[in-house]
Image (cartoon, rainbow, N blue to C red):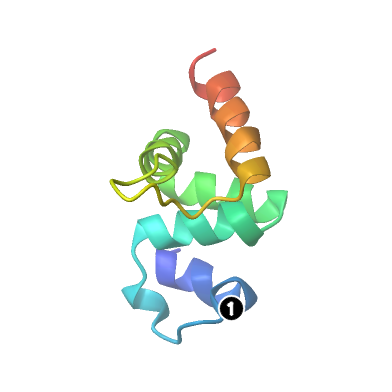
Amino acid sequence: MTVGDFVRKRKSLFWSTKNYDGLSNDAVVEGVLNYGDMNDVRELISLLGMQEVAKIFRHKSTPDKFGRQNYRPEIKNYFNLFFKKHINA
C-alpha cells in the first residue's frame, strides 16, 4: 500500500485536497495523529514504521521560529508519551 492509497481510504481526514499522492509524509502523519483514530495510527505506523512516524512527529511538533506547530496540546502530550514508551523503552 502506498501513502496515497492510505490517504484515499481516509478522505475525511484530508478534506482540503484531492491530490492524495501529492501529500508529504509530514502532512499525512499530522492529519492522522490529529484527527484519526487508533486504527488509523496503527496502520500508519505499519506503513511508515514507528521510528519514521515518531521522527516526523517530534520534528513537526517542535514550534518553528514563529512559535507555530499544528498539533493540538492534548495530541502533542499523548504522542510524546506514546513514542517515549514505545521507542525509548
Q: Is residue 7 above or below residue 37?
A: below
Across and down, in percent, residue 77 comes to 62, 34
Tell me what residue is drawn at x 56 percent, y 30 percent.
Answer: 80
Please indicate whether residue 13 sits to the left or right of residue 28 in the image. Answer: right
Q: In which quarter of the image is the C terminus?
A: top right
Graded by Cα atoms within 10 Å as few (under 14), some (14 to 19) or many (20 or more), the crowding at tag 1 reads few
Tell me what residue is drawn at x 49 percent, y 22 percent.
Answer: 87
Please indicate whether residue 67 sits to the left or right of residue 11 in the image. Answer: left
Q: Residue furthest bottom?
A: 18
Please indicate whether residue 73 sits to the left or right of residue 65 in the image. Answer: right
Residue at which label 1 appears? 11
Tell me what residue is drawn at x 42 percent, y 36 percent.
Answer: 58
Across and down, in percent, residue 35 comes to 65, 60
Is residue 44 in view from this perspective?
A: yes
Q: Is residue 45 above or below residue 24?
A: above
Three-letter amino acid code at the position of disc 1? Lys
Report how many numbered discs are placed on residues in the image. 1
Q: In this view, does 38 lie above or below 23?
A: above
Viewer-proximal residue, 39 or 88?
A: 88
